[in-house]
Image (cartoon, rainbow, N blue to C red):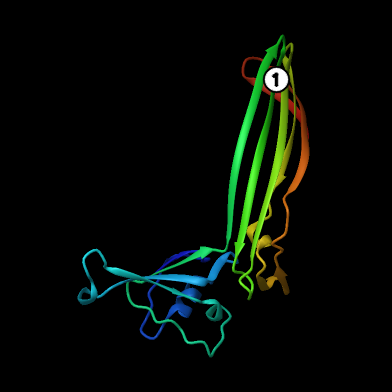
Amino acid sequence: VTVRGEFRRPAIYEVLEGEGLRDAIAFSGGMLPTAHARSVRIERLLPFAERSPGVDRVIVTVDAAALIDEQADTEDVALVPGDEIFVLPTIEEQRKDLFALVEGKSGAIKWEVGVRWENTNVAIRDLTPGDASIDTDYNHLLPSASAKIELGDGRVTISGARTVRRPRFDDASPVLLEEELGDNDFLGNPLLKPESAWGADLGYEHRLGRTGVIGVNVF
C-alpha cells in the first residue's frame, strides 16, 4: 500500500494478511501533529467485475483518531493490495505578499529602500471534540533600507530591516504530544502570533590588490 500526506515516513509498505490501517500508520512512523486524523482517505481500485465505464476506483474516508490513540477495542480498517492512504493537514497557511523597491545613486552612495506587505491566514480545522475551527489573520509591513558608500579602496555598507517569524506548525497545533521533549509532554497553542524584530548591519570592506578583499561586519 502507498502512504502519502501528513505521515512521518510516507512511502510504499508491504501489508500482510491480517494487517490493516493501524499497522500501516505504525509502519510510517505515525502521523504528524498537523494530520487530519479524522479524515483519512483510502483510494482503492475496484475489482474488474465491479468497474463501470469511467469508474475504476472508490475513495473511502475513515476516522482514524481512535487508531492513533491505540484503543484496543477499536476495530481496525482492512486494507487490500494497491490501496493508497492519504491524510490532509489540519493546519493550512495562505500567504499574500506585495513588495515595492526604490533604488538610486548619488555620487559615491548607492541606496535602496523597500517595503513588503505580508498577509497570512492560518486555518486550523477539526482539532477538538466539538469540531472547532480557528482562523487567524494578520498583516505586517516590513520596511527595509540599505546603502553602499565608496571610500577610496574601501566601501561602507549599512542596512536595516524589519523581519517576521511565524510559529511552527508543531507549536500551533493543539495536539498533546506525549514525551515529546524528553519526559515532558508538549501541547501547542493555536493562538500564537508571529514574532517581529528589527535588525541592522554595518560593515566595511577594503580591497587588497585586484582580487583580495578584507572586511568586518557588525550586526
Expressed as whole percent of the image width and height from the top left, the position of residue 176 reads 67, 72
| Quadrant in which the C terminus is drawn | top right
Expressed as whole percent of the image width and height from the top left, the position of residue 92 reads 57, 57
Question: For the residue carrying disc 1, how many other residues have a C-alpha within 10 Å: few (<14), some (14-19), or many (20+)?
Answer: some
Q: Nearer the viewer, residue 210 or 107?
A: 107
147 relative to 163, above or below = above
Write down the residue under mark 1: 111
Q: In which quarter of the image is residue 79?
A: bottom left
Q: Quadrant of residue 60?
A: bottom left
| Quadrant in which the N terminus is drawn | bottom left
Question: Is 121 left, or right, of 7 in this rendering?
Answer: right
Residue kind at label 1, given as amino acid type: Trp
Q: Which residue is drawn at 61% across and 35% down?
A: 98
Q: Nearer the viewer, residue 85 or 1?
A: 85
Q: Is mark 1 on a helix, strand or loop?
A: strand
Q: Residue at x 72, y 27 (%)?
A: 145
Q: Residue at x 22, y 69 (%)?
A: 52
Residue 31 visible in the displayed image = no
Instruction: Count the marks.
Output: 1
Q: In which quarter of the image is residue 61?
A: bottom left
Expressed as whole percent of the image width and height from the top left, the position of residue 203 reads 76, 26
Residue 38 visible in the displayed image = yes
Question: Is 20 left, or right, of 63 in this rendering?
Answer: left
Q: Which of 129 and 70 is in front in this view?
A: 129
